[in-house]
Amino acid sequence: MRIGFGHDVHRLVSGRPLILGGIKIPYPYGLLGHSDADVLTHALCDAILGAAALGDLGHHFPDSDPRYAGISSIELLKEVIQKIASSGWELGNADITLVAQAPKILPYVTEIAQNISNACKVSVNKISIKATTTEGLGFIGTGGGMSAYAVVTIASVRS
């Protein structure tokens, strides 16, 4: 068994949809990035890749590659799961925390967890989604952006 940790940060801007865990969240601002900028899924991808010692998201899906412009991060997550499977690993569980002043994501947590579990081909009870604020402190607290942290376990599928 191995443990992986991931972190990601994106700026909030007007004119973009807010996508978290592959789900469109109603909000007047969205996250800025080359892909759909799904900060939650990006942190998860980095944690999974790190646990398998396969580098990071930017290594596999560089923001300089036009193929990934606007791509769904859930599609990237599916590719990450394929990459670790090819290396003899499977996801054990994932614990993901969104750090954002707004919006509140509690109404969407179940849908986000189900979407991520489907992409990872694991039971939804292996995916934990949480959120917290910075109590108004820093650029996240003033509404300038969001960050996410993810911790995962992966297990060998080889005997």
Image (cartoon, grey):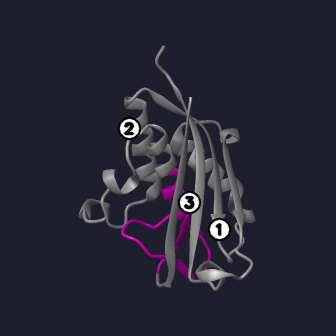
Alpha carbon separation for disc pair 1 and 3:
9 Å
* Residue at 57% in and 68% down: 147
Amino acid type indicated by mark 2: Lys
Element on which disc 1 rests: strand
Residue 24 in magenta?
yes
Q: Residue at x 39, y 65 (%)?
A: 35
Res. 143 image quadrant: bottom right
Vertical comparison of 136 with 88: above or below? below
Residue 120: assigned label? none
Q: Is residue 37 magenta?
A: yes
Residue 40: assigned label? 3
Q: Secondary structure at mark 3?
A: helix
Q: Is 30 above or below relative to 47?
A: below
- The amino acid beneath tag 1 is Val
What span is colored magenta in the figure? 16-44
Q: Please tell me whether mark 2 or mark 1 is closer to you in this view.
A: 1
Residue at the spot of label 2 = 83
Location of the N terminus (image quadrant): top right
In this view, the mark in front (1 or 3): 1
Q: Position of residue 73 (x, y in %)?
A: 45, 57
Q: Which residue is mark 1?
A: 99
Please tell me which of labels 1 and 3 falls first in the chain: 3
Q: Position of residue 117 (x, y in %)?
A: 59, 43
Q: Residue at x 61, y 78 (%)?
A: 140
Residue with the most extreme top position: 159
Residue 106: x, y in percent? 74, 64
